[in-house]
Image (cartoon, helix red, strand yellow):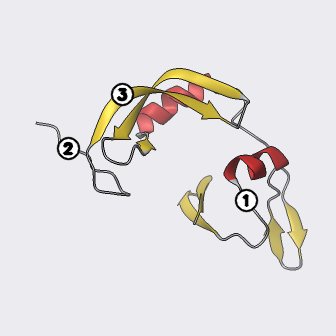
Amino acid sequence: MAKKMKCYKCDGKLEKTKENIEVLEGSKVYEETEVFKCNQCGEILMDSDQIKELRKKVDVLKIKRKLGISGNALVLRIPKDLQKFYGLEVEDIVEIIPINKHRFIVEIT
């Protein structure tokens, strides 16, 4: 029997369903995308296979940016539409999580 997955936010049960996923506010809605949805708080999560399927459909998700420099640090500029979509402001804190030598995740804390 498959292990029941739990929500990281509220410990509710995650159930496989289909949802409309919006990528970049107003840019594109991918209808009937397979996801896991918490039956308590409504949080939507995707496993790696679901993300791969969505990435096949997404044509606006990849944004290429050249790294800049500020003092001794590299700077990654975030486009205005992403800033607005995620509600980012100057002085917000994010976490950078290394995945491998070619990939990292930036999480808004």
Q: Which mark is residue 17?
A: 3
| 13 in relation to 92, above or below | above
Question: Label 3's element?
Answer: strand
Alpha carbon separation for disc pair 3 and 2 = 15 Å
List the residue tagged with mark 2. Answer: 4
Q: Where is residue 91 in the image (x, y as percent from the top left)?
A: 75, 73
Question: Disc 2 vs disc 1: which is toward the camera?
Answer: 1
Mark 3 surroundings within 10 Å by alpha-carbon count, few (fewer than 14), some (14 through 19), many (20 or more): few
Q: Position of residue 92 (x, y in %)?
A: 70, 69
* Amino acid type, mark 2: Lys
Alpha carbon separation for disc pair 2 and 1 = 34 Å
Task: Give the tally of numbered discs.
Answer: 3
Quarter the C terminus occupies: bottom right
Alpha carbon separation for disc pair 1 and 3 = 29 Å
* Amino acid type, mark 3: Thr
Question: Label 2's element?
Answer: loop
Question: Label 1's element?
Answer: loop
* Amino acid type, mark 1: Leu
List the residue tagged with mark 1. Answer: 88
**Identity of the residue drawn at 50% across and 26% down:** 53
Q: Where is residue 95 in the image (x, y as percent from the top left)?
A: 59, 67
Q: Using residue 12 as the reference point, say whether residue 52 is left or right of it.
A: right
Q: In the rendered structure, are the residues bearing label 1 and label 3 in contact, judged by CB atoms less than 8 Å apart?
A: no
Looking at the picture, tell me which residue is in the foreground, 96 or 16. 16
Mark 1 surroundings within 10 Å by alpha-carbon count, few (fewer than 14), some (14 through 19), many (20 or more): some
**Identity of the residue drawn at 50% across and 32% down:** 52
**Identity of the residue drawn at 31% across and 46% down:** 40
